[in-house]
Structures are given as structure tokens and as C-alpha cells.
Image (spheres, helix red, strand yellow):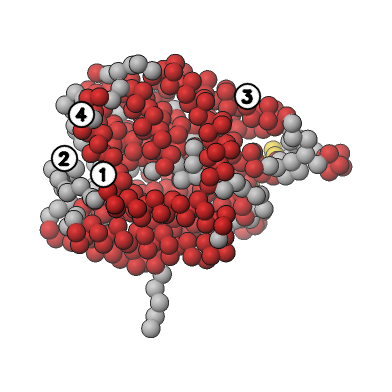
């Protein structure tokens, strides 16, 4: 009997849900769709998956490395079956499938396109050079997204520091380039782009976040500089090595592919009215373009560049498997959170929105968390997140809530490996490069809580305490 990949099994289950939803006419706007809330026990698969992601590489590494796809898919199927059989809710599953395909299309296209670009910086590694490198990464993450910047720069960052590389280098890279750096534009991070699609003006973000972004970046970069100054590296190797001071680029044609990916982000009926919708199919023209870029950019890439970058598909494969499980199992958690936020919305101020959005963005996907709390904040004024004009009215009415939610969704994505898509990809690339990355819990308790939470607390105290 022929065996099928567990990923294919879940995909076909989700497609069957999509067909059921289409036939029954249940694929309608979120404002018209009312579904029974899931049982709170249905958050167990999500919690179990998070725990296994945290403990697997640490306590049962061999088993985890060989079975994590089956585990993620199996737990996802538990949630899928529950929604189909008990809640008769195929719409939520279709909505999640759509979000997942958009997520993986963006990540995979940026991963493959940037993998065909080789950046060589033949300069001596110093704390100051690293600070400038990370600051540059933070800035360009607003142009090519945190995923694009992370995939483009992580390999050269490793090579620059090859004689003194430590886990903290990668942790700060994740903090700055993969997350906080991308807080200034809707291109920078998925939550902000979703806000843009819903009606938040494109330049609203930079106008209202830059004066929070700058001090946060200065504090984190200053901490990195202090820590990196104590790292002397391999002194003997450094004395023997000479540097030309040159910066070399290869595979620049792939910049065209990166440009196509960024432009395709805006090929959406919500942005450009003339773009046709492919509903009820769970992908659009944007995702089709991105998947085509994956294929074409890989086929036309310079093989020497791919070899020099030690490029393979394992990091994106790991993200694809784990996040299909995460996206599926987090549906009940998100719906329960959305319900509670709606019930308690009149009691929530900007500070509570900041911490609630932030903490849950680190544990759940930050994009739907952003939308859930934005919807709750708009509900305080009787406004609907699904109506563009009302989102625009809300931005003018009281922007402190949107500011708190936007900053928290992006910044707090850095507190765990699963807070933002690039985090796990960077971790996987570094582990394949031989860097001993900290475990899930070590990352949180040794780095995130100690470094980020005090900075995020200062931001809360200055900008959001007692407001709203």
C-alpha cells in the first residue's frame, strides 16, 4: 500500500473543508459568519505542540528530528477533525488555510530568492562593525520585510564573525533584523501589512512609531555593543588573517526576484480594486506569483552562489511543517482570545492592549493576534474592522490603541522562536552552520526576559501607561 506524506494528508483534509464550505455557501465575510466557540480543552493540541517544540531538541533530539513533521501534522488534524465533525465549521479552517498559504508563499519565495545572493564582507569583525551591520539590517527590513532581510543577511553576518561567533550574535540578529527593525512600514512585518489591507494608511506606521522605534533600537544595539566588546574570539586566528576591506556581491539578478516579491505583496483586491479575486480558492494571484518566483529563482540561480551559501531547503521545510501544525492548532486559542477581548473591550486601555497583544504575539502568530485586538479596540467605538472606511475613521478617532497594538505585535514577535516566521528560519540556518543555538526555553529565560522585557516595560511606561 502506498504511503502518503502527513503534509499531503492535512492538505487534502483542508481542501475538502474548502470544498464543503464552497458547496454550502458558508464562505462569507467575517461580519456575517457566526460560529460556536470551541471548547477550551481544544487549546491542548496547541499547548502540546509548543511544549514539544520547546523540549524536543533538548531532551529527545533524535526522535524529534525524525518525527516533528508527523507530530505537527497529527496535532493539526485533531483540530481540523474537531471543527469539521463537532462544530461544523469549515469556514474557520478555510480562512486558516488561506493565511497559511500566504505565509508560506512569502517566506519560501524570500528564502529562495535571497539564497541566490552572496554577500561577502571581507572586514575584521568588531563590535562597531556588527552594530552597523545590524542597524543596516533593521533599516532594510522595512523595505524587503523582516523575512527578506533575515534571509539576505544572516549568512554574511555569520561569516563576518566566523572566528568569534556565539549564540548571542544570532539572538540579537533575531531581535533586531527579524523583528523589531521591521516596525516602520506595512512591508516590514505581516501584522502591519494586514492593517494596511484593512485600511490603515501606508505612512501612518512610520509617522506614529518612529519615535518609539529609535530609542528601542538604540537600547538594544547599545546592549549588543557592550556584550560583543567582551568577546575577544580566537586571537591567534585573527592575528594570522588579513582583510581586503572589500564588500562583494554575487547573484544580483536575484534582486529582481526580490523586487517582484515585494511588488506582488500589493497585488491584492483589497489594495488594487482591479485585481481579480480567486475566491473561493484559498490562494490569490499574489501567492501564485510568489510560488512561481520560488521555482524560477532556484532554477536560474548561480550554482556557485548556492554552494557558497550552503543553500538547501531544510530550513523552509522545517518552518512549513511546524507552522502548518501551529496555524491549525491555534485556531481555538485565537477564537477564544478574540471572544474574551470583545467581551472585555470596554475595560481595556492602551497599556493592557500593549501587553496582551505583545505576549500573545510571542506565543501565537502575531498577524491574527494583531487583527483580533485591533477588532476589539475598534469595538469600543462601535466600529467594524471589516469596513475600510471605519478603520480609517478609527485611526483618526483614537490612534493610541492602534499604536500600542502595532508596536507590540512587531516588537514582541522577538520573545520566542515562534513569534515570527523568520525566527525559526534563522535558527535552523545557524544550527546547520554548526552554531549551538539555545533551546526554546533558554532563548526566553536567558535572553528575551532579561534583555527585551525591561526595554518593552520602559516603552510601556513612557508611551502607554494610563492612556486610552
Tell which circle, 3 or 4, labels the residue nearer the N-terminal end: 3
Distance from Cα at disc 1 to Cα at disc 3? 39 Å
Q: How many angstroms separate mark 2 from mark 4 (CA)?
A: 12 Å
The spot of residue 385 in percent (x, y) is 22, 33
Q: What residue is shown with label 3?
A: 222
Relative to 65, is 454 above or below?
Answer: above
**Which disc number belongs to residue 379?**
4
Residue at horizontal 53 percent and vertical 40 percent from the top: 444
Give whichever of discs 2 and 1 has the lower sequence position. Answer: 2
Give percent across and percent down for residue 137: 56, 34
Disc number placed over residue 108 in the picture, else none: none
Q: Quadrant of the N terminus?
A: bottom left
From what the image shows, is residue 436 above or below residue 238? below
Q: Is the C-beta separation of discs 3 and 4 under 8 Å?
A: no
Label 3 to label 2, Cα distance in Å? 46 Å
Residue at left 39%, top 80%?
2
- Residue at the (48%, 65%) spot, across then down: 67
Q: Earlier in the sequence, mark 2 or mark 4?
A: 2
Number of other residues with Cα within 10 Å of mark 3, as a class: few under 14, some 14 to 19, many 20 or more: few
Question: Mark 1 and mark 4: span between their CA atoms?
Answer: 16 Å
Residue tagged 2: 31
Q: How many C-alpha atoms fall within 10 Å of the one at disc 2: few (<14), some, or many (≥20)?
A: few
Q: Secondary structure beneath disc 2?
A: loop
Mark 4: few/some/many CA within 10 Å (<14, 14-19, 20+): some
Q: Which mark is residue 335?
A: 1
Amino acid at each position: 500500500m502506498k504511503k502518503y506524506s502527513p503534509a499531503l494528508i492535512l492538505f487534502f483534509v483542508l481542501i475538502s473543508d474548502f470544498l464543503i464550505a464552497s458547496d454550502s455557501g458558508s464562505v462569507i465575510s467575517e461580519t456575517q459568519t457566526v460560529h460556536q466557540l470551541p471548547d477550551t480543552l481544544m487549546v491542548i493540541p496547541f499547548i502540546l505542540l509548543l511544549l514539544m517544540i520547546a523540549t524536543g531538541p533538548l531532551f529527545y533530539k533524535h526522535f524529534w528530528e525524525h518525527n516533528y513533521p508527523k507530530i505537527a501534522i497529527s496535532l493539526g488534524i485533531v483540530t481540523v477533525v474537531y471543527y469539521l465533525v463537532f462544530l461544523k465549521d469549515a469556514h474557520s479552517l478555510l480562512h486558516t488555510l488561506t493565511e497559511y498559504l500566504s505565509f508560506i508563499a512569502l517566506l519560501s519565495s524570500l528564502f529562495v530568492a535571497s539564497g541566490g545572493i552572496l554577500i561577502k564582507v571581507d572586514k575584521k569583525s568588531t563590535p562597531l562593525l556588527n552594530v552597523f551591520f545590524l542597524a543596516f539590517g533593521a533599516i532594510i527590513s522595512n523595505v524587503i520585510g523582516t523575512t527578506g532581510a533575515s534571509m539576505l543577511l544572516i549568512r554574511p553576518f555569520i561569516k563576518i564573525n566566523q572566528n568569534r561567533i556565539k549564540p548571542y550574535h544570532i539572538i540579537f540578529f533575531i531581535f533586531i533584523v527579524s523583528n523589531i527593525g521591521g516596525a516602520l512600514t506595512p512591508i516590514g512585518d505581516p501584522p502591519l501589512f494586514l492593517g494596511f489591507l484593512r485600511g490603515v494608511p501606508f505612512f501612518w506606521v512610520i509617522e506614529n512609531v518612529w519615535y518609539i522605534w529609535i530609542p528601542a533600537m538604540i537600547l538594544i544595539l547599545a546592549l549588543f555593543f557592550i556584550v560583543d566588546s567582551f568577546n575577544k574570539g580566537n586571537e591567534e586566528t585573527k592575528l594570522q588573517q588579513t582583510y581586503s576591506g572589500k564588500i562583494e556581491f554575487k547573484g544580483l539578478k536575484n534582486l529582481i526576484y526580490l523586487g517582484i516579491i515585494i511588488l506582488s505583496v500589493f497585488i491584492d483586491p483589497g489594495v488594487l480594486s482591479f485585481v481579480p479575486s480567486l475566491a473561493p480558492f484559498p490562494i490569490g494571484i499574489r501567492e501564485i506569483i510568489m510560488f512561481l518566483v520560488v521555482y524560477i529563482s532556484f532554477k536560474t540561480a548561480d550554482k556557485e552562489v548556492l554552494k557558497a551559501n550552503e543553500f538547501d531547503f531544510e530550513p523552509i521545510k522545517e518552518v512549513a511543517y511546524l507552522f502548518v501544525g501551529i496555524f491549525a492548532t491555534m485556531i481555538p486559542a485565537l477564537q477564544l482570545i478574540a471572544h474574551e477581548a470583545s467581551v472585555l473591550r470596554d475595560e481595556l486601555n492602551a497599556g493592557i492592549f500593549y501587553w496582551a497583544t505583545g505576549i500573545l504575539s510571542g506565543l501565537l502568530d502575531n498577524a491574527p493576534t494583531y487583527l483580533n485586538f485591533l477588532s476589539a479596540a475598534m469595538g469600543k467605538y462601535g466600529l467594524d474592522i471589516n469596513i475600510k472606511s471605519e478603520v480609517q475613521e478609527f485611526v483618526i478617532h483614537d490612534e493610541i490603541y492602534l499604536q500600542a497594538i502595532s508596536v507590540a505585535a512587531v516588537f514582541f514577535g522577538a520573545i520566542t522562536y515562534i513569534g515570527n516566521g523568520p525566527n525559526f528560519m534563522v535558527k535552523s540556518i545557524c544550527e546547520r552552520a554548526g552554531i549551538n543555538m539555545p533551546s526554546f526555553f533558554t532563548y526566553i529565560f536567558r535572553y528575551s526576559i532579561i534583555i527585551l522585557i525591561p526595554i518593552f516595560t520602559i516603552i510601556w511606561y513612557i508611551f502607554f501607561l494610563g492612556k486610552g
